[in-house]
């Protein structure tokens, strides 16, 4: 089985719309339209899993850059998530303590600010 990414979808698209369009090139094993967890509205992308790699490659060739409900969609083979990738951006930012190893606040000179 092989999964493809479908992006730049209209926000009004439904899973049935995708199934009708992308089912033309092969057997869809799984389809997931990504939606906002608070509003339930589509985020404009999704993933489609085909029964074979050949079907997935046919879908990319047939639909990448093509018009779908008024938008030029992006279709490509999905890349597997890296081990430990939560999709949340990694360790960038967050809380940074202003205390040194002894637990006391660090003193900074005026020039450091």
Image (cartoon, helix red, strand yellow):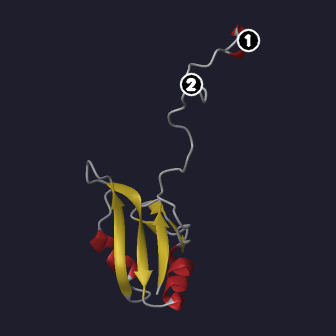
Graded by Cα atoms within 10 Å as few (under 14), some (14 to 19) or many (20 or more), the crowding at tag 2 reads: few
Residue 87 appears in view: yes
**In x, y percent, where is residue 70?**
42, 60
Q: Is residue 52 above or below residue 33?
A: below
- Whether residue 93 sits left or right of residue 8 in the image: it is right
Q: Give residue 43's quadrant in the image.
A: bottom left
Name the residue nearer the viewer: 12 or 87.
Answer: 87
Which residue shows up at 56% across the image and 25% down it? 99
- Which dot, 2 or 1, sits closer to the camera? 2
Label 2 – label 1 distance at C-alpha: 18 Å
Q: Give the image quarter of residue 111.
A: top right
Q: Looking at the image, which residue sits at the far top?
A: 110
Question: Residue 53, image x and y in percent?
Answer: 53, 88
The image shows residue 85, relative to residue 110, as above or below, that is: below
Q: Which residue position is annotated with label 1?
A: 111
Residue 105 vs residue 9: left or right? right
Residue at screen point 42% across, 80% down: 49
Q: Is residue 57 above or below residue 97?
A: below
- State the residue position of label 2: 99
Q: Specify whether 3 is left or right of 32.
A: right
**What residue sits 56% from the left and 19% below the top?**
105
- In the image, which disc is placed on residue 4? none
Q: Is residue 25 above or below residue 11?
A: below
Is residue 98 toward the left or the right of residue 110 in the image? left
Q: Position of residue 57 (x, y in %)?
A: 55, 84
Q: Secondary structure at mark 1?
A: helix
């Amino acid at each position: 089985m092989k999964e493809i990414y479908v992006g730049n979808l209209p926000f009004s698209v439904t899973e049935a719309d995708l199934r009708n369009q992308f089912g033309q090139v092969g057997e869809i094993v799984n389809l997931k339209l990504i939606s906002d967890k608070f509003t339930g509205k589509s985020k404009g992308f999704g993933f489609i899993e085909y029964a074979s790699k050949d079907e997935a490659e046919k879908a990319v060739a047939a639909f990448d850059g093509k018009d779908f409900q008024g938008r030029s969609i992006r279709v490509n083979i999905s890349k597997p998530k890296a081990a430990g990738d939560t999709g949340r951006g990694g360790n960038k930012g967050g809380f940074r303590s202003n205390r040194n190893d002894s637990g006391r606040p660090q003193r900074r000179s005026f020039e450091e600010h």
